[in-house]
Amino acid sequence: MKRRSSWHWRLVPWLNIMAVASAQIPENLVVEGIPPVPPGLMASVRPYLEFRAAGFTGWHPTRRELLITTRFADTPQLHEVKFPGGARRQLTFTPEPVRGGSWQPKQGNYIVFAQDKGGGEFYQYYRLDPDTGRITLLTDGRSRNGSGRFSEDGKMFAYTSTRRTGRDTDVWLMDPADPKSDRLLCELAGGGWSVSGWSPEGAKLLLREYLSINQSRLYIVDARTGAKELLTPDEATPVSYGEAQFARDGKSLFCTTDKDSEFERLARLDLRTREITVLSGGISWNVTEFDLSPDGKTIAFITNEDGVGKIHLIEARSGRKLRGPELPLGIPSGVKWHENGRDLAFNFNSAQSPTDACSYNVKTRKLERWTESETGGLNPANFIEPELVRVKSFDGLPVSGFLYRPDAKKFPGKRPIIVSIHGGPESQSRPIFQARNNYYLSELGVAILFPNVRGSSGYGKTFLTLDNGFKREDSVKDIGTFLDWIAMDKLLDADRIAVMGSSYGGYMALASLTHFSDRLRCGVDVVGISSFITFLKNTQDYRRDLRRVEYGDERDPAMAEFFQRISPLTNVDKIRKPLFVVQGQNDPRVPVTEAEQMVKALRERGGVTWYLLAKDEGHGFAKKQNADFQFLSTIQFLQEHLLR
């Protein structure tokens, strides 16, 4: 039975909100098999629904002020913060989430930001004129646009777009002050192209062609003619190149690459000789991002060291290490220099702090927090820090994960546990702020394990390939190893284990239920793949070939037979435990058909299946009222099928 209605927050007194919310459902949700949310649950969960985060997106070019995204209503919007700890002044007021934004360089006359509709990920660029609040559409309103970069003088904006074929990501140029100036610079084949940056004088563009997580190329493109030159020819062993920026003299560029290494290192590439010089020294972990100072003398870069992030400063020419900020255990990201050459802004996130914007003055060594996002009135110091778990899998391969344990004094005895598997699959679980998950830990006494199975990023390029193609189910076997480890831990209850995941993690949850149904109580699949064959057939054209490199090509009969054999849809008879399926109708990555066919197959066999569909969402729920209902329903599902 489907139940539909809408929230009427403004029509009821504040004291009646909880009672109304318990009876009503956001109007764009389709709810099947899910019981009504009781008022008592709403009351206990409410503080955990009010967490915020503030993401740094850019500096003002002439003033020491930040541009951030944060949510005060239903979706994240652009705000400005004029000084550390200052008020957040909202700049955009739209029903859809704003995806980043940046001031026009040098003059700061306007802001360019990206936004899609209903989670479809067909992003459009818009110009915001702060003096009037007027928003102007810059792109065609239909295609997928991305990786926009301003020239250093702020006069031109380069970006990629699928508007020519719907599949290929060509490069386009415009002056955002004059949208009619928009023009196609160069036609490109494939969906993996992005703009990395401009040369200092604005005559050239730096492009990256992503082929797979293990292989990419860098090109220089003439910004007038569109002629392109390959900088990094293919080698016998695939090489990955990540971020890249021109040096200030235009004679070399800086980039991250795993050339001659298991990990992505920071390097300088000489444009004349093509010689590569490693600058990040003997750090045996990935350099995830970097930024070059305006004077070209200093580089700030971030490393991912066993899941924990660190900021480093070095001299650009010599690689000599400089003193950087001393941060608590957590994850910095989005590092960016101000035009003054002294202030370095970044985001910071930890188990006890949601994402907030910070800055570091390299001259005075002063570290400042610009935003302090709310945690629903809860004391973040009480949130649980994780422990690192290391195990050896079925073939002796070391794999690891982060385990969060409830307070043993408050919840004595063996604790039920959620095994939450990341997506990607080339992603990584890291010790981040757990936000709403803290309700499971602090109120339900449920432990959470975030495993990093083979194929996860962060552990070297060989580890990344160990689940590719015909090795797909080796990563599922890694979950079996973690289940064995749980059974050996005296503080965890091996008879009460739930598995959940989103996107590729949703596939992993479904696959775990087909392999280990006798060891699991239930599962939660959020926008997950149920059949690789139908997934590759129906995913958006611009990403199909990129996914074939990771998963395998279904046009190969041997691979098609393998996909058919391992897909959860084929093995639905082996799923003998309750399942909660969550899906966005507009998902361009994992189409809604993946959820529909799984729910249909389970129900035909009499399986217990809850289903939640959002008609105004895509690859996950981005709107607060939808995400709130999803979380409340998940709690009820776990109370019913894990805790009882």
Image (spheres, helix red, strand yellow):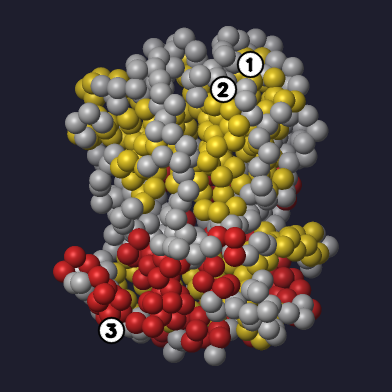
Residue 140 image offset from top left, x and y in percent? 25, 35
Q: Is residue 414 above or below residue 323?
A: below
**Left or right: 535 with respect to 136?**
right
Q: Which residue is mark 1?
A: 297
Q: Nearer the viewer, residue 336 or 602?
A: 336
| Nearer mark to the viewer, of 3 and 1 | 1
Left or right relative to 585: residue 129: left
Q: Earlier in the sequence, mark 3 or mark 1?
A: 3
User: Looking at numbered disc 2 in the image, what kind of residue is underneath it?
Assistant: Arg
Question: Which of the 4 image quadrants contains residue 381?
Answer: bottom right
The residue tagged 3 is: 1
The x and y percentages for residue 265 are: 70, 32
Dot 3 amino acid type: Met
Q: Nearer the viewer, residue 103 or 172?
A: 103
Gap between marks 3 and 1 measured at Cα: 64 Å
Please indicate, yes or no, whether residue 92 appears anywhere in the rendered image.
yes
- Distance Cα–Cα, label 2 vs label 1: 12 Å
Q: Quadrant of residue 14?
A: bottom left
In the rendered image of this protein, does residue 20 appear above or below residue 594?
below
| Foreground disc of the pair 2, 3 | 2
Q: Which mark is residue 342?
A: 2
Q: On the picture, is 499 further left or further right than 114?
A: right
